[in-house]
Each structure stands twice: as structure tokens, then as C-alpha cells.
Image (cartoon, rainbow, N blue to C red):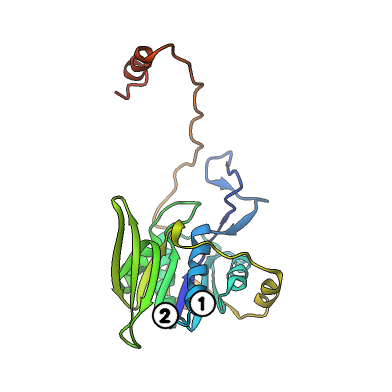
Amino acid sequence: MKVLVPVKRVVDYNVKVRVKSDGTGVDIANVKMSMNPFDEIAIEEAVRLKEKGVATEVIAVSCGVLQCQETLRTAMAIGADRAILVECTDELQPLAVAKLLKALVDKEQPGLVILGKQAIDDDCNQTGQMLAALAGLPQATFASKVEVGGSAGEGHVSVTREVDGGLETVKLKLPAVVTTDLRLNEPRYVTLPNIMKAKKKTLDNVKPADLGVDVTPRIKTLKVSEPPKRGAGVKVPDVAALVDKLKNEAKVI
């Protein structure tokens, strides 16, 4: 069984992002970039499935600029067998990415697609769901546990999901789409020997046009601004004063 794992290149989670002076977006010039943490969890889970003998091949996919090759090399250092970069310099919105992934799913015919539930830059939480809808595949989101079973041709995956009321377990017929949550696993540390091995693995470059996909943006960003700064706190002498301020000033009660 093939496992397809989309990964995204994002601003590193340790970096404090700054908004551009013209308000058109976030400044990423000379900023450290890394793999989206949720996608790193997805790669780890796919590699673990391969180590268990459930998966035969793990394919990492990324859509974006040429520098996304670095992210794919990291994915291969974790354990992916090969990688595909859909190279595009235009802004890619979730729907466009889902269409590109759908074209790759049609081409590669994976038994399972595992991706992060959301990217930490836009927090859209849409791509996995859109991909499942476009490809006509069952989906399980916010996975905290994944178990693949069944015989060839009749495989299934049981996914424990994190929902508001606790945990929910669903059983899907393969092929399927699964999006990962934080508690699914702890990604392994990438060692230097594996980084060197990743340089020898296959990395294919394709264009959106090669896949027959139109990636024209459907949404226009009007303005990006920083959240307002918090005001200074005040000390109150007693509970009555606190309730009065919450009621009359903050107007939250």
C-alpha cells in the first residue's frame, strides 16, 4: 500500500512573524522556514506504518516554490521513500492545493493519504477535507490514533478522533484521507546519516499545468494587520470592585 503525505513549507514556529508595512501580508524575507509541525507528525505516522509492514512506500508531496525541496528532503530524511514537488511561484490557496493533490492521487493511486490537520501559517484546516471531497474518498480528521487492518483489496483504517466531547473512533474503507492532530505521535529526530541518504532519493518536479490544474486564487486578501496590543492590567481591592469593572467597563457580564 502506498501512503501519500503532503507537507508544507511554513515560517518556523519559533519565529515571531512581522506584518509588511503595506499590509499586504507577512514578511518572510530572511526568515527561517521549516516543515509544518502537523505535517511532520503525518510523515512520522506514515513511516511507522511502513515499519510495521502495513505500507510499502511513503511518498512526500509539496506544492510551492523551489525551496520546498528542502522540506521534502527533510521528509525523506524522516523516512519517506521519494518525493514530488509541484513547483509554483503563485500564491496557492487550500482549494488549489487540494486540486493538485487530487491529480496526484489519481496518478499515484495511494491506499492512504495522511496530512496535517492545518498549517500553522494560515490555520485554514481545509485542504484535507477538500481533497477527500474532490477525490470522493472517506475522511477522518483530527486523528490521535491510526490503525490499518484488513486483507488486500478490503483494507480499512480505524481512526480515533479528538472531538469536543472527548474521543470518537471511526472506521473507514481504504483508500481514505486522514488528517493528524498533535497527540498522534512524537516525530523522530532526524539524524545526519539519514539526511545524507535523503539526498540520493528521488525527487520529481512537476508543474500545475502538467497535472491539468488551474491554481488561480479564488480569494483576495484585502489587508493583513497585527492584533491590537493588550492594555495594562489593574489591581482591584475586592471582589465587588472586580465584578463592577467586568460589568461596567469590560461589559463581559
Task: Return the residue nearer the eye: 156 or 208.
Answer: 156
**Can you give x and y, in whole percent of width and height, for residue 226 in the image?**
51, 37
Instruction: Compare marks 2 and 1 and give the one earlier in the sequence.
Output: 1
Would you say 199 lies left or right of 140 here? right
**Can you give x and y, in whole percent of width and height, for residue 170 in the image?**
29, 67
Which residue, given by chain and number where applicable, does mark 2 sit on?
A: 110
Camera sees residue 199: yes
Q: Which kind of residue does numbered mark 1 sit on?
A: Ile
Q: Which kind of residue does numbered mark 2 sit on?
A: Pro
Task: Return the residue nearer the eye: 219 or 238.
Answer: 238
Work out whether 12 lies above or below 201: above
Q: Residue at x 48, y 56 (%)?
A: 119
Which residue, given by chain and number where applicable, does mark 1 sit on?
A: 59
Would you say 194 lies left or right of 177 here? right
Q: Residue at x 61, y 81 (%)?
A: 202
Residue 149 numbered mark, or none: none
Would you say 23 lies left or right of 134 here? right
- SS for dot 2: loop
**Can you give x and y, in whole percent of width and height, for residue 64 in the image?**
54, 64
Mark 2 burial class by Cα count in 10 Å: few <14, some 14-19, many 20+ = many
Q: Residue at x 50, y 51 (%)?
A: 121
Work out whether 164 lies above or below 84: above
The answer to whether the residue labelled 2 contacts the one labelled 1, judged by CB atoms less than 8 Å apart, is yes
Would you say 99 lies left or right of 75 here? left
Camera sees residue 215: no
